[in-house]
């Protein structure tokens, strides 16, 4: 039987690189590839390679020398906020064995670099001894709290309900937490009930909501095609016009979401203003 995900090791030339993402100075990805298999993921577009895009979600390559390379780089770089991770999940299952993310966090923290973690995995709780109220924020990507829908959208990611207790625990410990609500997909996870479930969690944990629309980078629509045809026949053809930043749909949705947040006193912002 062919395994769903293949694992291997690679060596990297750089562990940390400059980031153009809002709020981050650097990005660090201890792994190349991701086994979550999210059908909406646009990370493959970063690499502009058809073979990588077709197989994204089916392989994970551990940057086996990432800690040593990071140690060398940090000696030469000015302090800045490091995003972990920006194109893969830093706490996917292989991290449970290799602990590359943990070792990088230890090193960054020792060198006084602020750290911003983003994950879909409860494995981040393992590192609660390292993650402090100063110098850290922890974000959790929650596309939906509806389990059946989540399994279709991100088939090998941990269940979103497994994150609820984790967010609560970090919040109780005084850690700055946030929820990445995205991607918001028209007619899939954009209903008021879906939003309120996540807003309730944000209110309870004093988390900020950072929201974003579906990003139709190359290969994304192809990856979603089968799901869309089953769930909403005809939506695939309409999606490109709905998810432009100046569409009437997106404007109405932003107003709706932000109004719901305001009524609950939940902080919010667009991922890409």
Image: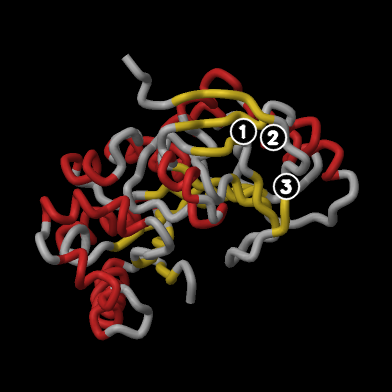
- Whether label 3 touches label 1, CB < 8 Å: no
Q: Quadrant of residue 244?
A: bottom left
Could you tell me which residue is drawn at 34 percent across and 64 percent down? 214
- Whether label 1 touches label 2, CB < 8 Å: yes
Q: CA distance from mark 1 to mark 2?
A: 5 Å
Crowdedness near tag 3: few (<14), some (14–19) or many (≥20) residues, C-alpha within 10 Å: many
| 188, above or below 51, in the image | below
Q: Secondary structure at mark 3?
A: strand
| 166, above or below 247, in the image | above
- Residue 104's label in the rendered image is 2
Discs 3/1, front: 3
Crowdedness near tag 2: few (<14), some (14–19) or many (≥20) residues, C-alpha within 10 Å: many
Quadrant holding the N terminus: top left
| 124, above or below 141, in the image | above
Q: CA distance from mark 2 to mark 3?
A: 10 Å
Q: Which residue is mark 3?
A: 16
Q: Which residue is mark 1?
A: 101
Residue with the most extreme top position: 1
Could you tell me which residue is drawn at 89 percent across and 44 percent down? 75
Could you tell me which residue is drawn at 48 percent across and 44 percent down? 51
Classify residue 66 as left or right of residue 194.
right
């Amino acid at each position: 039987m062919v395994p769903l995900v293949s694992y291997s090791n690679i060596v990297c030339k750089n562990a940390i690189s400059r980031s153009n993402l809002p709020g981050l100075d650097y990005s660090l990805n201890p792994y190349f590839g991701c086994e979550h298999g999210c059908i909406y993921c646009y990370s493959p577009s970063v690499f502009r390679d058809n073979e990588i895009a077709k197989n994204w979600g089916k392989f994970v390559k551990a940057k086996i020398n990432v800690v040593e390379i990071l140690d060398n780089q940090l000696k030469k770089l000015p302090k800045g906020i490091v995003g972990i991770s920006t194109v893969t999940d830093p706490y996917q299952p292989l991290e449970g064995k290799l602990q590359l993310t943990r070792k990088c966090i230890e090193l960054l923290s020792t060198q006084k670099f602020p750290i911003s973690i983003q994950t879909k995995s409860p494995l981040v709780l393992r590192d609660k001894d390292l993650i402090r109220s100063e110098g850290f924020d922890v974000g959790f990507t929650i596309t939906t709290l509806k389990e059946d829908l989540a399994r279709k959208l991100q088939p090998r990611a941990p269940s979103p309900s497994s994150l609820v207790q984790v967010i609560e625990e970090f919040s109780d410990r005084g850690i700055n937490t946030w929820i990445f609500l995205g991607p918001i997909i028209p007619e899939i996870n954009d209903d008021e009930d879906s939003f309120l479930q996540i807003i309730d969690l944000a209110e309870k944990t004093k988390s900020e909501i950072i929201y974003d629309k579906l990003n139709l980078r190359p290969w994304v629509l192809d990856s979603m095609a089968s799901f869309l045809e089953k769930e909403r026949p005809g939506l695939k053809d309409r999606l490109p016009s709905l998810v432009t930043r100046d569409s009437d749909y997106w404007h109405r949705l932003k107003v709706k979401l932000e109004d719901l947040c305001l009524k609950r006193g939940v902080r919010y912002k667009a991922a890409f203003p």
